[in-house]
Image (cartoon, rainbow, N blue to C red):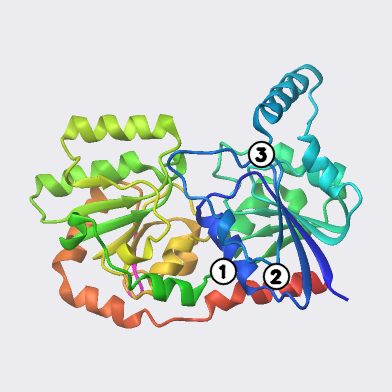
Amino acid sequence: MKKKILFVITQFYKGGAETSLLNLFHCLDSQKYEVDFLVLNQIEYQDATSLMGEVPEWIHVFDAVKNRGNGVKLEQLAGKIYRRLFHTETYVKSAVDFVKNRKYDVAISFGEWLSPAFLVKKVNAVKKYVWIHIDLDKADFVNKEELVKYDSRITGYIFASEKSRQSSIHRCPQMTEKSIVVHNILNRQNILSRSAEDVTLPQANDSFLLSVGNLRVEKNYPRQIEVMRILKKKKIPIKWICIGSTVDKNVYGEVSELLEKYQLKDDFILCGADDNPYKYMKRAKAVMVLSDHESWSLVISEAKLLGVPVIATNTSGAQEQIVNGETGIITSFQVEEIAEEIEEFLNDLELQNKIKKNLILDNTQNLGILEFEDLLER
């Protein structure tokens, strides 16, 4: 008999965690599993890439707000007012109705940004998990108390890396005995084939660095711009291309102001969302992962797969994924030191070739699916 699995997520737009989930969907065996995928609030964004159309057909996707129009907007507004008045969660009726008469072997609340309340209160499942993709001790924007509020009714917490698990249980010790590691999953065939597609962006014909990540606070694009400012002052002949959604208007505004202030718009290029970052990645001198924190960076894994060096800040994810000076460069969080590391890397052809030579694909892309299937059998 097939195991019945439910995934619940707020939205399904392209990001590291979401791409890893999509890859998991493509790795799961339709002969062994019956999967429901409930998306609670897939509202439209102008500069974001939806992954809804890439979900395998055998997976039952339910978009709770699709074709609901103004009715769902009024329902959401009423829900906000209700939460403020009574300090309790409300949910779109269609989402509640979807799970009402269903029973699952395993149900997963996907993302630290999503309260487990819906999973706990509305879903009937033998086992219930919360899937977390960050270091909880470093992410101030996450409501950690809400994540563990229903601990007695949660089977376990899934983390993307061992270091992320360890750092997070220091902040939330009640997770200790329930914490599990399932590494992010790559779709190797898709990455390799799409990396061969043509690039039409003129700047991509020049020597360039590449950042792949939505404009969010933890990605710290302002720091990247400050690094580019130093490189330009030193007259280092390099462009910096950035692929990622700009829907966070506060971050986008700050980044735009800095680019205007430093006159870097032609050097630090915001390309917006793109459903195929791999064609740029394959052609980059190096991929930059200069976040404030990363638990297990899918971008690092993707770059390694394509044989492209990564220069990353000293996050827990970088520590697990990169051997400094051998399979990539790990730098501090300081602007001047990052710029210096980049300059040394660009000037050292021997180092570049050494790193590329050492980027032999390991089994990381398969590890996550094995870990997930092991979890389902527990």
> Residue 334: within the magenta?
no
Report which residue position mark 3 lands on.
67
Q: Earlier in the sequence, mark 2 or mark 3?
A: 3
Place of residue 35 in the rendered image (x, y in percent of width and height, measured from the top left): 75, 63
The residue that disc 2 covers is: 372
Q: Are marks 1 and 2 in contact (CB under 8 Å)?
A: yes
At which x and y percent is residue 52? 59, 54
Q: Nearer the viewer, residue 151 or 276?
A: 276
Left or right of 41: which side holds 231?
left
Looking at the image, the residue that sits furthest to the left is 235
The label on residue 185 is: 1
Q: Check the image and report above or below for 123 versus 205.
A: above
- Quarter holding residue 118: top right
Kind of residue at badge 1:
Ile
Residue at x 75% of width, y 53% of height: 175
Q: Which residues are magenta?
A: 326-330
- Quarter containing the C terminus: bottom right
Is residue 327 highlighted in magenta? Answer: yes
Residue 110 vs residue 326, the one in the foreground: 110
